Amino acid sequence: MIVVMKSGASPEQIEHAKATMVELGYQPHPIEGELRTVIGAIGDERGKPEDVESLSILEGVEKVIPILPAYKLASRDFKTENSHVKVKDVTVGNNKIAVIAGPCSVESEEQIMEIARAVKEAGASMLRGGAYKPRSSPYTFQGMGIEGLKLLRQASQETGLPIVTEILDPHDLDAVVEYADMLQIGARNSQNYALLKQVGKSGKPVLLKRGMSTTIKEFLMCAEYILSEGNEDVILCERGIRTFETATRNTFDLNAIPVLKEKTHLPVVADPSHGTGYWQYVTPMALASIAAGADGIIIEVHNNPEVAVSDGGQSLKPHKFSLLMEKAAPVAKAVGREL
Ligand code: PEP
Ligand code: MN
């Protein structure tokens, strides 16, 4: 980190700042300017925000500028090559774009089986579906629970598609781990650190969604929680953030895709369904995500969106999903990937 002294800092204050750095385990390298002194503190400040705090409150110190990001395991400095996350026989993070598709919620055997067959037919690589739903209202459908998990397994057994489903509560971990091939942490739980630690210990790949008001740095710190428990199989998911805009459900942060790809080695998946909230905008933003460098897309598909119990308005009908797949193939090819 760099410690910038105030222009009127006394020699004693500069000496005290240097001594404090040594005490904290850093090597001070002062640069005396005409107006002020700047001290480079050589050492690894990652994971030690209290060191930055200790130095910034010293007398004569104007500000402290950390150089390294607060996350370690998630950063590109830690691992330069792209991570590949295996979900059964599907690899996310290599040249092939992963396509996760399925309904927002599992609603019935007929519904999930029909959708699973349709998305498989169209070329999806994994099946999504919520059995435990984080609804904004406690009076709306909360998910089928364990029955939903069983139906997902049935759909997986028939189609061969691995299952991605949300875990809401650490109490359900054992049940969800038994049925899911990848655990989804939803936007509302992205900073639920107790849950992040639990999924970090689960040994299952995790699809971590970005919280609706988390910065990219905070998002990477959430991933760090899972990684620091020894689980390396983390996939990040951009799903839109809250802004002043009301024309769409969220503001899909396309910028986050290249930014994340630069800052972390973890695979990045885009969710234009929640990112836009309207089915009409899903395909264009899915294509844009692939062009921007996403390693995969997650798309809500429903066989009868008009009667869906959740997120019908942003769900593609199966034939629209097939069209998306057709349009996505040349886009992937144009950026050196395949679908
Ligand atoms: C979902 O995937 O259906 C969902 C609830 O997503 P999010 O957590 O991104 O809102
Ligand atoms: Mn949904």
Image: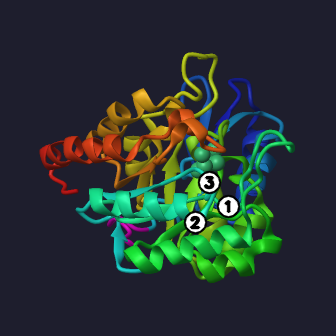
Name the image quarter holding the C terminus: bottom left
Front residue of 336 and 172: 172
x, y percent for residue 94: 28, 66
What is the secondary structure assignment of the residue under circle 1? Answer: loop
As drawn, the label of residue 105 is 3
What is the secondary structure assignment of the residue under circle 3? Answer: loop
Task: Work out whether residue 218 can be spotted.
Answer: no
Q: Earlier in the sequence, mark 1 or mark 2?
A: 1
Residue lying farthest to the front in this orientation:
110
Q: Is residue 24 left or right of residue 219?
A: right
Q: CA distance from mark 3 to mark 1?
A: 38 Å
As drawn, the label of residue 73 is none
Please give the count of numbered marks on the rendered protein: 3
In this view, 205 is above or below 281: below
Q: Is residue 85 magenta?
A: yes
Front residue of 253 and 314: 314
x, y percent for residue 240: 55, 36
Quick one: label 3, few (<14), some, or many (20+) residues within 10 Å?
Answer: many
x, y percent for residue 299: 44, 48
Judged by depth in the image, the label closer to the viewer, 1 or 2, is 2
Report which residue position mark 1 lands on.
47
Three-letter code for the amino acid on which mark 2 is drawn = Glu
Q: Give the residues in magenta.
A: 79-87
x, y percent for residue 185: 64, 59
Judged by depth in the image, the label closer to the viewer, 2 or 3, is 2
Front residue of 258 and 140: 140
Three-letter code for the amino acid on which mark 1 is drawn = Gly
Quick one: label 2, few (<14), some, or many (20+) residues within 10 Å?
Answer: some
Three-letter code for the amino acid on which mark 3 is drawn = Ser
Look at 50% across and 43% down and name the residue there: 304
Report which residue position mark 2 lands on.
109
Query: Does any atom of ligand 2 lie closer than 8 Å to the CB of label 3?
Result: yes
